[in-house]
Amino acid sequence: MGQRDKPYQTFRQIWGAPLEQQMKALRDPAFRAKLLAEEPAYPAGEIIEMLCIAYHKMFSLGERPNYEPTPEESAKAVAERTGKHPREVVLDWMMERDGKALIYFPLMNYHCGSLADVETMLTHPNTAFGLSDGGAHCGIICDASFPTTLLTHWGRDRTRGRKLPLEWLVHGLTARNAALVGLQDRGVIAPGMKADVNVIDFDHLTLYSPHIVNDLPAGGKRLIQKTDGYTASIVSGAVAFRNGEPTGTLNGRLVRGAQKRPEGARIPAAAD
């Protein structure tokens, strides 16, 4: 049998081992050289092939993620500048932070090497803000950070294109979405409405890199992503989180379908 018939034999020696043991092996020059010499094996034409060798779309995801890196920061570009194989560049990145570093791989909306296409979609009048793939793919995708990314990247930090107005982003995350799905009892701060409010220290709002936790049934894994800067999260008028830590107050309730506007609620005309 050839090498492609028995793929990943070197890595299988440490597959399932504790992270510290894996890192020890990956730092060994002989093991590392043997690992990098193996060619990946995948069914021709499958998406896994693209995921394995599309080095021009692989970027190092730092402790504070940059979701709009330049093409010059890709594994392919770094490999060309340093004379390394792109696989070695990716391995180096993954070994950072004691093996807990992640690779950023934007799939379909980054073919121009920027988020210009995403900007077009975000600002289209028929677009509603929302993103969630936290069920089926919670072990490989962390979309829970989407609202924070809107505020930090698009409203404050973006350098490779225009920033979007903060008040417009907040409106899109709150009143506009609430009206779109028929939740007429929330989305604006006004007398009689549901008192759900996030108090945000916008200047210090920080999104960190995702990390894996194994807290699902049977030890299943999922990605979570921490933030700083949410001073308080208020649910139905009571503080549920203070600086990201739960207070023990559980005011949330299951919502079934559209909700009517409370009688007597006084909503400014601009909020509609």
Image (tube, rainbow, N blue to C red):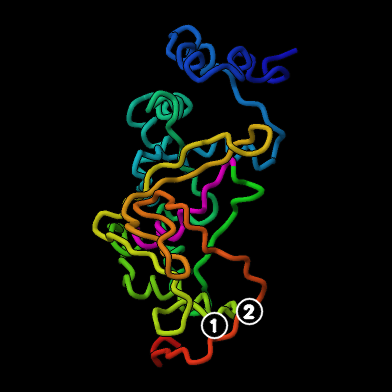
From the top left corner, tell me how far across and down residue 166 is, in percent: 32, 70
Question: Does residue 29 lie above or below 54 as drawn?
Answer: above
Q: Quadrant of the N terminus?
A: top right
| Dot 2 amino acid type | Ala
Question: Does residue 154 lie above or below 263 as drawn?
Answer: above
Q: Residue at x 63, y 16 (%)?
A: 12
From the top left corner, tell me how far across and down residue 106 is, in percent: 49, 48
**Which residue is farthest left?**
203
Can residue 227 be seen in this snapshot? Answer: yes
Closer to us: 241 or 151: 241
Question: Does residue 51 lie above or below 270 as drawn?
Answer: above
Q: Quadrant of the C terminus?
A: bottom left
Question: Does residue 67 lie above or below 39 as drawn?
Answer: below
Q: Residue at x 40, y 93 (%)?
A: 269
Q: Residues within 10 Å of mark 1 (few under 14, many from 20)?
A: some
Can residue 85 be seen in this snapshot? Answer: no
Q: Which mark is residue 258?
A: 2
Q: How far is mark 1 from mark 2, CA to CA? A: 8 Å
| Dot 1 amino acid type | Gln
From the top left corner, tell me how far across and down residue 123 is, in percent: 43, 73
Q: Residue at x 54, y 16 (%)?
A: 35
Closer to us: 100 or 28: 100
For the residues bearing labels 1 and 2, Cβ distance under 8 angstroms: yes
Q: Which residues are magenta?
A: 139-153
Q: Residue at x 59, y 65 (%)?
A: 253
Disc 1 target residue: 184
